[in-house]
Image: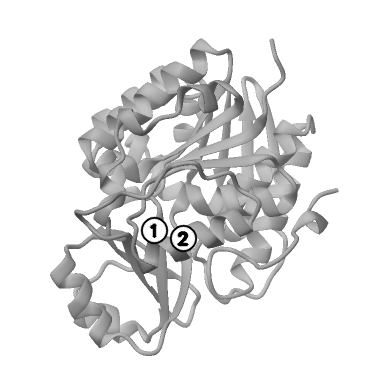
């Protein structure tokens, strides 16, 4: 098989994040479920933005974050995702390319604006997300670059795509193209509410199309219907080649067949948990595509996650190659 040009190809929503620190009462007043992600329309986006305190603006999107952090760690990363030809789209393209990520998707002309995610961070560092998908929701099979997928060691998909039928179809088609080329497919379950609301699609995707699964405990429980972590892990370890399951302050557990590796967390002062799982996946796949063993993959992943939660925003700035090793 021809060596791939890219290590990691992310396929997902291209979003600009707007982050603000709020007290717990703000979430209650807005009837929000702490730690979740809700889709909102343009009107709700404008209304909520008007209520938010001063905010930090940065490029985001779950899989885009992973591609960016992986690129900063030294992986050869690429990303497929749609932005508009507007101010936010220009910000997104500038930021992801500045992270060393190949982003060939041309901007959309006319129609919806670039997606935005209003992220509310409470004093405990937990993030609650309100996402206006905008033009990112137009991602469909025709946006896929078949040659790029076939030339990437891992195609990495985000669960949030399953909210939109065309985007879910793009995920399945990307997996088919990758497997036909002898490459791997990875997915992040993204959010427990997303899994609950699209359960059959997720179960089919994981069972039939996924080699590497990333999930936290809530997402895993939603997928399997089992609250006990060990029981739920046993279900998915029989369906995928590798399952990397995060457990917050308890670290993570990696399964491959009968193998199990418990990975200790890297201690960090929690400022903002936005992007922790994205960074974990970046570190893991950067190590995996560099030929490292699974315990090392877990250590690189934990370092990347710890670096991310120690500051505001989902993408630590600058060269992150020091997280390797």
Give the quadrant of residue 46. bottom left
- Answer above or below: position of 147 versus 307: above
Q: Residue furthest right?
A: 325
Q: Residue at x 52, y 67 (%)?
A: 273
* Residue 123 visible in the picture: yes
Distance from label 2 to label 1 (Cα)?
Answer: 7 Å
Q: Position of residue 181 (x, y in %)?
A: 55, 13
Task: Give coordinates of residue 310: x percent, y percent.
Answer: 64, 72
Question: What residue sits right under mark 1 in the picture?
Answer: 15
Answer above or below: position of 58 versus 256: below
Q: Nearer the viewer, mark 2 or mark 1?
A: 2
Q: Looking at the rendered structure, which numbered label has been put on residue 92?
A: 2
The x and y percentages for residue 180 are: 50, 11
**Mark 1 Cα-neighbour bin, 10 Å: few <14, some 14–19, many ≥20:** many
Q: In this orientation, does residue 247 appear?
A: no
Q: How many marks?
A: 2
Labels 2 and 1 touching (C-beta < 8 A): yes
Q: Position of residue 27 (x, y in %)?
A: 28, 78
């Amino acid at each position: 098989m021809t060596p791939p040009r890219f290590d990691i190809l992310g396929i997902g929503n291209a979003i600009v994040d707007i982050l603000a620190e709020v007290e717990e009462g703000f979430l209650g007043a807005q009837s929000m479920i702490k730690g979740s992600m809700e889709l909102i329309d343009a009107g709700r986006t404008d209304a909520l933005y008007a209520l938010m305190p001063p905010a930090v603006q940065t490029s985001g999107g779950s899989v885009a974050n992973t591609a960016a952090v992986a690129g900063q760690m030294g992986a050869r990363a690429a990303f497929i995702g749609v932005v508009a030809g507007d101010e936010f789209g220009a910000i997104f393209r500038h930021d992801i390319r500045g992270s060393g990520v190949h982003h060939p998707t041309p901007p959309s002309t006319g129609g919806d604006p670039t997606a935005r995610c209003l992220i509310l961070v409470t004093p405990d560092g937990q993030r609650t997300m309100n996402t206006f998908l905008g033009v990112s929701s137009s991602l469909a099979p025709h946006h896929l670059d078949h040659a790029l997928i076939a030339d990437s060691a891992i195609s990495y998909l985000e669960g949030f795509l399953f909210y939109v039928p065309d985007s879910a179809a793009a995920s399945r088609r990307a997996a088919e193209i990758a497997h036909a080329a002898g490459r791997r497919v990875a997915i992040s379950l993204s959010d427990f509410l997303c899994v609950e609301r699209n359960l059959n699609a997720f179960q089919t995707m994981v069972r039939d199309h996924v080699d590497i699964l990333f999930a936290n405990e809530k997402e895993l429980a939603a997928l399997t219907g089992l609250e006990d972590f060990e029981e739920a892990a046993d279900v998915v370890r029989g369906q995928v080649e590798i399952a990397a399951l995060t457990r917050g302050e308890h670290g993570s557990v990696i399964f491959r067949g009968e193998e199990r590796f418990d990975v200790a967390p890297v201690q960090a002062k929690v400022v903002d948990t936005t992007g922790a799982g994205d960074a974990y996946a970046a570190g893991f796949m950067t190590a995996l595509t560099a030929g490292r063993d699974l315990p090392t993959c877990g250590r690189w992943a934990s370092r990347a996650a710890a670096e991310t939660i120690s500051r505001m925003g989902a993408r630590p700035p600058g060269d992150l190659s020091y997280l390797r090793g």
